[in-house]
Image: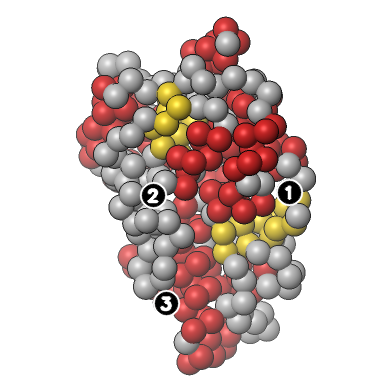
Amino acid sequence: MRLSYYPGCSLKTSSRFYEASILKVFSHYGIELEEVDDWSCCGASAAHTIDEHLAHLLSARNLALAEARDYPLFAPCSACYIRSRMTNEKVRDDADFQTEVNEALAPLVCEGTLEVKNIIEVLEEYVGVEAMAKNNRHDLSGLKAVPYYGCVLTRTMRITPYDDKENPESMDVLIEALGMKVVAWPYKMECCGAGKTLTDKDVTRRLSEKIMDMAITLGADVIVTPCPLCQMNLDLLPLIGRTAASLPVLFLPEVFELALFGSLTGTGSHIIPADGVLKKIGEA
């Protein structure tokens, strides 16, 4: 099983432990990742607000580089995944746009031929729920999780989302297959503040605290997300003004690490410690 891999900027900087977790878990399941040569920033959640055409060109360059291989493109960052999918499908379906893009990218060529997948899709399709449930080595049944998709992952414009826009359940199924209990909650798709952390951290604190407080009220032990920006904003709460207790915020593959290895590669990278989670697994 092989995939082209577009890590995006976050997984090489602030969310390096997300990449480390992905590589460890994927290796266990025999999924090979080939990083796209000479990839560049896709513009993520910001570029299209200034110049949508330029944002498409940024994504199209990476897609063109990835098209040299006959593998689906894996983009674990929610924003990178959305931007890549939107550009890929627009290039594929709009011949005039494809011509315009390729004139700007020459000598690179982008034809929109790739399948672009997020981490939930990859784990679901390349591993499968049945295999996940059979291979768990550590008991996670003493832990309760709230799955936090973030406001971007399924709210795609002009393309069909991989899951329900307002009540996605695909990540819930994966977490349950690993033995962790999923707590139903209304904030799967709430905004954490996104990039406002840079310009108005009080907005991020207010929005992220709302999410954190609900997770605590419902009795969760952890918040689980596939999004680097969501993870960072929630994890930053103690540093941007929150004084109340907070739950650890894990990336989805970190739940796989717990089930498979009973440990976390990125333990020291979490601002809100995950020691209590590890202790519960040890006791089980």
What residue is disc 1 on?
A: 31
Query: Do the numbered discs 2 and 1 sit on residues whose CB atoms are within 8 Å?
Result: no
Q: Which mark is residue 218?
A: none
Q: Earlier in the sequence, mark 2 or mark 1?
A: 1
Crowding near the residue tagged with mark 2, few <14, some 14–19, many ≥20 C-alpha atoms within 10 Å: some
State the quadrant of the N terminus: bottom right
The Cα atoms of the two marked residues, 2 and 1, are separated by 25 Å
What residue is disc 3 on?
A: 53
Q: Is residue 18 above or below residue 245?
A: below
Question: Which residue lies at the image location 47% right of the left edge and 20% below the top edge?
Answer: 143
Q: Amino acid at mark 2?
A: Pro
Residue farthest toward the top in the current orientation of the protein: 283
The Cα atoms of the two marked residues, 2 and 3, are separated by 30 Å
Q: Is residue 282 above or below residue 122?
A: above
Relative image position of residue 251 (x, y in whole percent): 51, 36
Q: Quadrant of residue 279?
A: top right
Q: Nearer the viewer, residue 161 or 49?
A: 161
Q: Amino acid at mark 3?
A: His
